[in-house]
Image: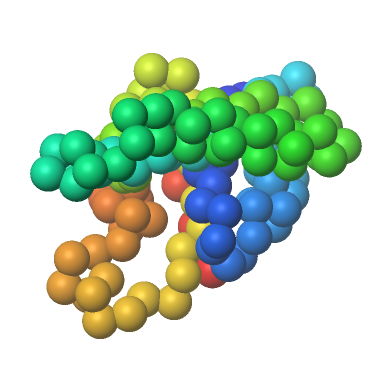
């Protein structure tokens, strides 16, 4: 059992965030902490100059609101966090700074691009300093 579980969420991903949250609640010790986490990917500079100035801030606000709605529907206490950056790096960095002892992450069926570049879940599994539970 774990005391501090990080659950990275991608809103258009399967298995769903509800499944990942259910697994986290099955794995958490009494009195433990579950955090829903989302990464808003930053755009390269040559693209971001073409976008509205507050687009990144707006995406963070929208993502936070979505996570809070999921957290409110949970039967157990859940906190939320949103960061910007590259998905796998942001997940690993947040897990380290929050002292997570387990990451519950969803993974999709790998496509050809995943075999060449690797998926976010695969990078998290390879580099995490804590246990990782992968859902497929």
Splitting the image into 4 quarters, where does residue 13 fall?
bottom right
Is residue 31 positioned above or below 107 on the image? above
In the rendered image, the residue lying farthest to the right is 75
Residue at (38% x, 18% y) in the render: 97
Q: Position of residue 55 (x, y in %)?
A: 40, 35
Q: Quadrant of the N terminus?
A: top right
Q: Position of residue 85 (x, y in %)?
A: 29, 35
Q: Position of residue 49 (x, y in %)?
A: 19, 37
Left or right: where does residue 119 sit relative to residue 34?
left
Q: Quadrant of the C terminus?
A: bottom right
Splitting the image into 4 quarters, where does residue 89 fall?
top left
The number of discs equals 0
Is residue 77 positioned above or below 13 on the image? above
Residue at (23% x, 75% y) in the render: 113
Of 41 and 31, which appears nearest the observer? 41
In this orientation, does residue 27 appear?
A: no
Left or right: where does residue 51 sit relative to residue 81?
left
Is residue 30 positioned above or below 111 on the image? above
Residue at (55% x, 29% y) in the render: 61
Of 78 and 27, which appears nearest the observer? 78
In this orientation, does residue 80 appear?
A: yes
Q: Position of residue 32 (x, y in %)?
A: 69, 23
């Amino acid at each position: 059992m774990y005391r501090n579980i990080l659950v990275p969420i991608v809103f258009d991903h399967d298995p769903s965030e509800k499944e990942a949250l259910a697994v986290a609640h099955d794995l958490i010790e009494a009195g433990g902490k579950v955090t829903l986490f989302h990464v808003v990917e930053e755009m390269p500079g040559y693209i971001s100059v073409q976008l509205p100035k507050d687009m990144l801030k707006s995406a963070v606000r929208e993502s936070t609101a979505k996570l809070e709605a999921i957290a409110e529907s949970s039967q157990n206490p859940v906190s939320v966090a949103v960061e910007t950056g590259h998905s796998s790096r942001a997940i690993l960095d947040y897990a380290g700074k929050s002292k997570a002892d387990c990451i519950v992450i969803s993974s999709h069926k790998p496509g050809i691009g995943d075999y060449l570049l690797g998926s976010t879940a695969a990078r998290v599994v390879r580099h995490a300093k804590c246990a990782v539970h992968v859902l497929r």
